Amino acid sequence: ALPTEAWEPELLDLMRRYQGHLSRWQLGEDGDFTLQARPDRDALLTRVADAVAKVTRYPILGVGVDPTAPGAAETTAHSRLQFVSLVLPRSLTPVQVEQALAAIPGAGGASRPVTYAIPEIFQVERYQGMREQIVQLVQSALHARRAGARETVFLPLAGVQTGLFDLGADPTPAYFAVRTLNLLLSGSRLDPRSFVHDPAVESPVFERAGDRVIALWRRPGARAQELSLPIGEQARVLDPTGRVLDVPRSDIERRIEASDTPVYLVDLDRGLV
């Protein structure tokens, strides 16, 4: 809102000092959507981009955007921005995460990274709260992948209720859930087909270097059910934190309960899956 001369010298001084260490420059914090809501948004972005170009010829400039709020598509499409950080509100359900990202072209790519705020633990019984936190986190990440997201940042790094690490720097269950997502799905391609043809079950298939991973959980409102799946003698079933589950088996089949807690099917027989 201030004249350019009121903020340009300080901004350019900051960039000159740190441009050898930073490659991306974001206007405002991830949770600050003031710019998105301003009526003079486009003109202000142009003024900032013109100022930044005085320091570096090819600036990588971006802003944080709430994909569910007015002005998201217009801000994302501004010609002087090289990236936008799509910040997902904690209030979104996993299905709403997919819907919100699907409305933004290129969501989750290098120029449209997704920032996901880890859900808070509300339950008085802490272990039940942790389970619900993990369910929402993993389901949301999987729905985001289906909407095209390939680059997701999980925040905050530290915190008693929401962090990947607690205040003593010990990893939380959320950390192990994110680590498992990273180990299993980073660099993978999402197959457009589902493995289980059941309207009550979600079963996206991911492929990487010839190996396939299936994520499995029940859809909201559906009843938990046991499935007999032919996935191979060596197949394993992992919980959201990467722990191997002991499930009933019969030769090439595994009997798996499809509940709201996602599981991963790994080491699959390519002749069967």
Image (cartoon, helix red, strand yellow):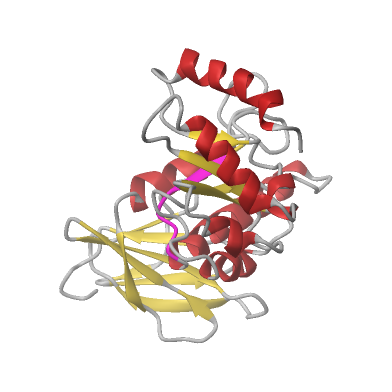
Q: Is residue 86 left or right of residue 4?
A: left
In the image, residue 154 sits, relative to residue 270, either above or below, namely above
Report the front residue among 61 and 268: 61
| Residue that appears at 44% across and 58% down | 149
Would residue 268 be visible to someone looking at this image?
A: yes
In the image, residue 223 sits, relative to residue 33, either above or below, namely below
Q: Position of residue 232 (x, y in %)?
A: 23, 68
| Residue that appears at 67% across and 22% down | 167
Q: Is residue 156 left or right of residue 123?
A: left
Q: Quadrant of the N terminus?
A: top right
Would residue 90 be visible to someone looking at this image?
A: no
Tell me where the magenta segment starts and ends, as one range.
Answer: 148-154
Q: Position of residue 77 (x, y in %)?
A: 51, 60
Report the front residue among 153 and 29: 29
Q: Position of residue 123 (x, y in %)?
A: 80, 48
Q: Quadrant of the C terminus?
A: bottom left
In the picture as drawn, the residue positioned furthest to the right comes out as: 124
Report the front residue among 69 and 199: 69
Q: Position of residue 67 (x, y in %)?
A: 62, 60
Q: Quadrant of residue 72?
A: bottom right
| Residue that appears at 74% across and 57% down | 91
Q: Quadrant of residue 212?
A: bottom left
| Residue that appears at 59% across and 23% down | 11
Does the magenta segment cover residue 167?
no
In the picture as drawn, the residue positioned furthest to the top comes out as: 17
Q: How many marks?
A: 0
In the image, residue 216 sits, relative to residue 16, either above or below, namely below
